[in-house]
Amino acid sequence: KKADDVVYGPNNAAADEAYEVSCGANFSVILASLVAGDGGTLKDSKMWTYGHNANGQLGHDGKKGEVTIPRVLGNCKVVVQRISCGTDHTLAIANFVNQGVAQVMGRVFAWGLGIYGALGTRPDSGRNHEPTEVWFPSDHYEEGDHNRHERNVVIRQVAAGTKHSVALSAEGQLYTWGH
């Protein structure tokens, strides 16, 4: 794309809803605010992704190639609050919402190229084409038993680097993973 090409603008129904943008190497993510909530949280949101998808960093599916028109990242059962793109991976902070009320806040999801542990997901894989939740040391996670998950960490900010990621908790704890 050239600098004067409009990929997200007046001809798009969600143009007035752009809330946050982030760019990785050859791809971009746009967070659209559909319903703003109290205290700077979003009650509803959509993510639009476009660009190069060789490593799943767009979060759409396992198809490699290029997405030239922004596509909504579908099947989100969470409300995304913040986004950050690394070189070949994406992080998002999300709240689990039930009937418009946040039930679990400040969870991190990651997708894209996970070499050197950049995604921080279980199990650590080379590429993850779908958003997968990141679990932190004080969280309790039991494989295969969804009723035994305990989320104790609330994340307020994330940053994705080349092959690493960083998260800042509401309590001021800094978590890092990757190379």
Image: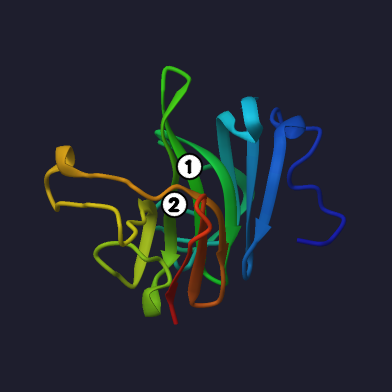
In the figure, 42 relative to 176: above or below?
above
Viewer-nearest residue: 51 or 177: 177
Which residue is disc 1 drawn over?
Answer: 94
Looking at the rendered structure, the kind of residue marked 1 is Ala
Image quarter in which the N terminus is found: bottom right
Residue sitting at the far front = 171
Viewer-nearest residue: 141 or 50: 141
Asked if disc 1 and disc 2 are in contact, CB closer than 8 Å, the reply is yes
Q: Residue at x 71, y 32 (%)?
A: 17
In the figure, 42 relative to 91: above or below?
above
Q: Residues within 10 Å of mark 1 (few under 14, many from 20)?
A: many
Which residue is disc 2 drawn over?
Answer: 108
- Decide which of tag 1 and tag 2 comes sooner along the chain: 1
Residue 91 coordinates in the image, percent (x, y):
50, 57
Q: Residues within 10 Å of mark 2 (few under 14, many from 20)?
A: many
Q: How many marks?
A: 2
The residues bearing labels 1 and 2 have C-alpha atoms spaced at a distance of 6 Å
Residue 24 relative to residue 121: left or right: right
Looking at the rendered structure, the kind of residue marked 2 is Val
Image quarter in which the C terminus is found: bottom left
